Every structure is written in structure tokens, then in C-alpha cells.
Amino acid sequence: MLRLKVIACDVLNREISLLSSKSSCFVDTTFLHQGLHDTPEKLNRLLQKEIAKANEGFPYNHFGTAPHFDYIVLGYGLCSNGIVGLSSEKIPLVIPRAHDCITLLLGSKNRYIEYFDQNPGTYWFSAGWVERGWQPSEARYNVLYKEYLEKYGKENAEYLMEMEQSWMKDYKNAALIRWNDLGSSEYYRKFTTESAEYLHWNYSELEGDPSLLTRLLNAEFKEPEVLVVPPGKKAAPTYTEEIIKYI
């Protein structure tokens, strides 16, 4: 049985937990806090720290019978260049060829690109994003406005909220990625439809595809889906459709 150390964003917690339970491999997962892509240097440091810990040895090494993991698998894409420069001393590092987690939820980067090209201005929702993210919604607006009002007064609060909301003008579609095998799907749908209504966005719903994550968690590493970075090499961006390479 192959031993995989998975280091992933907490936004994928439900999906990875579900698929890990069905994997033919031993899967030991560490989830990092959602939102670290907003601070890519911090994300990079935390990922490198977890990679180094994985290189120290398998956590259930009884009498020296299983000294190492076979692979370290990242549940991240390029993620604002947060994975750039990552390297592993002893164990191959496996990274999906993806810009972000949406590719992992939809099953392929081609499906992601195709949908985005047909639906520009899409903001994504999923189980993890609804549960662990700070998604645009009426609740988010009210909480922030109350905080700004108490700290800065009405005029400044209204100005800050105008700045807070300004990025939303680039979006017009709220897309929910639905995995049928996950529970609470009605909750995620209700949250997303209410957010879309409040923001005057269109609502769409896509069925997620677990195939890419399933292969990752079963150590079925296929080009051009993933990059396997040999020990001692570093991950780097390509700025092409391959997305990442090693140097």
C-alpha cells in the first residue's frame, strides 16, 4: 500500500475526506486554513514547513518498517504563486496542474477554462467555500458595515463599504459546484441563491467531478493533470497552459 502525505486547503476538507476514505492508499492529510492564497508568501512558508515535516518520516513507523511516505500530494494549484519554489528533500512532490481549487472541484482545467470562457464574471461557491470562506452575501455586508460603523462613524463606514464592494462590479454570476455525495447540498444551494439574489447576480449550478481528486488520492498521477517534482527540484510557474514545471 502506497503512503501519501496530503497537504491541502481546508476549502477541500469535505471532498478530500470523502475520497480519502475510499482510497486504495494510506492517506494522511493536513488541512491548512482557507484563505492563505490571499497571502501567498505565508502560504508558501506553511507549505514548505509541512513538506519538511513529511520528509522526517512516516508517523506510524513501527520498528522502522515504514520509514517514509511514498509521495507528498498538494491539494493546491498555483494559488497566487503560493507554491512557487516549493521543494522536497527526499520524497517526490505531486502538484495538480491547476490555477486554483476550482479545477480540483470541476475535475479538469479544461472544464474550468471552458466554463469560464462561456461565463465571464463568475464567482465560485462550493461546500468548503460556503462553510469556511467569507463569501459575498448580505450577512457579510451587514457584519462589516456594523464593525466599520462602530469604529469609524457613518460617513466613513459607508465609504469603506463602497470600497469593499467595488471589486464585485466585475462579477455577474454566482456558480455553485455541487458534489452529490456530500451532505447538506440544500444548505449550500440556499446560501448561494440568496447571495446571488442580494448581489443581483445570475445563479448557476454545476455538478462537480471527483475524478481528478480521486486519481490524486489513489496515486494515479497522469500527465498533463499533475506535475511530479523530483526530490531536490523546485516548483515554478510556466505562464503557459501547463501552468507549472520544476527547475
Image (spheres, rainbow, N blue to C red):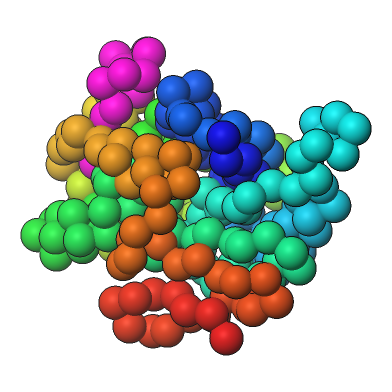
Which image quadrant for residue 189? top left
Residue 165 drawn at (x, y percent): 43, 53
Q: Is residue 67 above or below residue 207?
A: below
Q: Is residue 173 above or below residue 230?
A: above
Q: Residue at x 33, y 53 (%)?
A: 103
Q: Residue at x 26, y 21 (%)?
A: 180
Of residues 242 and 189, the one nearer the viewer is: 242
Left or right: 240, with 91 as reference point? left
Viewer can see residue 106: yes
Which image quadrant for residue 40? bottom right
Residue 226 drawn at (x, y percent): 40, 62
Viewer can see residue 131: no
Range of magenta residues: 175-188
Q: Residue at x 31, y 19 (%)?
A: 181
- Residue 202 among magenta residues: no
Q: Quadrant of the N terminus?
A: top right
Left or right: 70, with 181 as reference point? right
Which image quadrant for residue 156? bottom right
Q: Is residue 39 above or below residue 36?
A: below
Left or right: 245, with 27 as reference point? left
Of residues 206 and 66, the one nearer the viewer is: 66
Left or right: 144, with 65 as reference point? left
Of residues 148 and 184, the one nearer the viewer is: 184
Q: Residue at x 78, y 55 (%)?
A: 55
Residue 201 drawn at (x, y percent): 21, 43
Task: Name, please, the residue furthest toward the right.
Answer: 63
Q: Quadrant of the C terminus?
A: bottom right
Of residues 171 and 242, the one nearer the viewer is: 242
- Residue 186 among magenta residues: yes
